[in-house]
Amino acid sequence: MKNELIKIKNWWNDLDKFILIPTFILISIGIMLVFSASQVLGSKYELSQYYLIKKHLIFVIIGIFTILTLSTLSPKNIILCSIIILIIAMILSIIAIFFFSEFKGASRWIKFSNFSLQPSELIKPTFVIVSALLFSRYKNKNDNSIIFNIILLLIISSILISQPDFGMFILVFIVWFSQLLMAKISLKITSLMFFSFFCILVFCFFFLDHVQFRLKNFFLNIGDNYQISKSLESFSSGGFFGKGIGAGEISKSLPDVHSDFIFALAGEELGIIFISFILLVYLFIFWRIYLISINEKNFFNYSALIGLSNIFIFQTLINVSSSLNLFPTKGMTLPFISYGGSSMLSCAILIGFILSLTKKSK
């Protein structure tokens, strides 16, 4: 018993509290905002006004458990865990495409009972770890690891585009490409991958209707701008100090106010000052991880931390920018704040991996 208490004490002392505590702050803000959204959406869909918040609290408990559990693992176990989850997530994503019905024009979800899982969400943090391992191996041994890495990227890209999930494809590729640059791979390979990415973008624009629609709608203002208009009105309505939790009206007319547009709800109910604080919390977590990563002598740890922190901050920026009409709308959640079990689990895995890799004693 005494030895177990010592282990727990050592684990707690080794954890980076400057990452853990801000994460819990974001989770708490998410609970508050989902509770507010739950009251309106419950009545809209003839459900209990506490239906969403009850499910969200279950996701939060699972998320916190995942963060703390993964933070206890060693880097070797993090790699093993990532390989297993990545393989399962890829298989389930393919199953979702062929065996489950579309929802909002996409085949990304596996539904069971009152819950649904988006397996592709689990690809993001685990692929970063596996990719960091392959880049590290290539730098050390100069073998075929880079070829296997590219093949894996192509398979994942094919899955995401087939669903289709164009936004997540862009996010995954950009993060992978940042790892490629950090690895200082030959200019020939780097140029080839950049050119391939450009060709895929052109292909998606001409052959995926929703991609073409969203880009034209953003750049040429062609199409229905109801959600963006209401989102911008929400920020204007909230002003500097907001209307208070539960008092937002404009933002709650948004169909996805509990998920993709929860930042608009925060803008109306909490105000510009508080949402600026939220953004600072995200930036603080990113900056903390970055400071630790640049001092890493182990290339695997360095590449993994850079990739994980980039996913975290890029996803945040995409969601916030979409709400402010600075970026084409994309069904991407705000980490730890938006409602959604798959998103919460994915972000929890990401932070759990980061806490494991940033422990004081490795």
Image (cartoon, grey):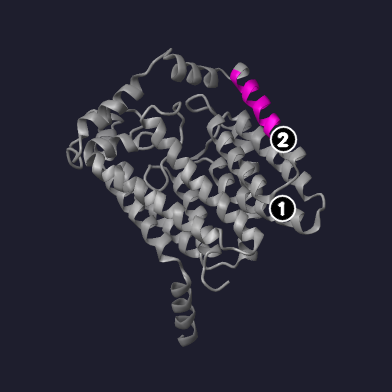
Mark 2, mark 1: which one is toward the viewer? 2
* Residue nearer the viewer, 153 or 259: 153
Three-letter amino acid code of the residue under disc 1: Leu
The answer to if 193 sits in the magenta stretch is yes
Q: Is residue 274 visible?
A: yes
Question: For the point 52% across and 59% down, which residue is it?
Answer: 354
- Return the x and y of residue 275 as percentages of the image width and height: 29, 43
Circle 2: element type: helix
Q: Earlier in the sequence, mark 2 or mark 1?
A: 1
* Residue nearer the viewer, 180 or 69: 180
Question: For the point 50% across and 62% down, which residue is it?
Answer: 355
* Residue nearer the viewer, 7 or 277: 277
> What secondary structure do most residues of the magenta stretch adopt?
helix
- Return the x and y of residue 331 as percentages of the image width and height: 46, 32
Task: State which quadrant residue 202 falls in.
Answer: top right
Residue occupying the far bottom of the picture: 2
In screen coordinates, is 182 left or right of 147? left
* Dot label at residue 5: none
Circle 1: element type: helix
Magenta residues span: 191-205
Task: State which quadrant residue 17 falls in.
Answer: bottom left
Q: Quadrant of the C terminus?
A: bottom right
Question: For the point 70% across and 37% down, which residue is it?
Answer: 154
- Return the x and y of residue 327 as percentages of the image width and height: 44, 28
Give the CA separation, mark 2 to mark 1: 19 Å
Residue wearing tag 1:
134
Q: For label 2, count other residues whose C-alpha is less than 10 Å away and answer few (under 14), some (14-19) or many (20+).
A: few
Q: Is 69 drawn above or below residue 229 in the view shown?
A: below
Task: State which quadrant residue 170 falls in.
Answer: top right
Residue wearing tag 2:
191
Three-letter amino acid code of the residue under disc 2: Ser
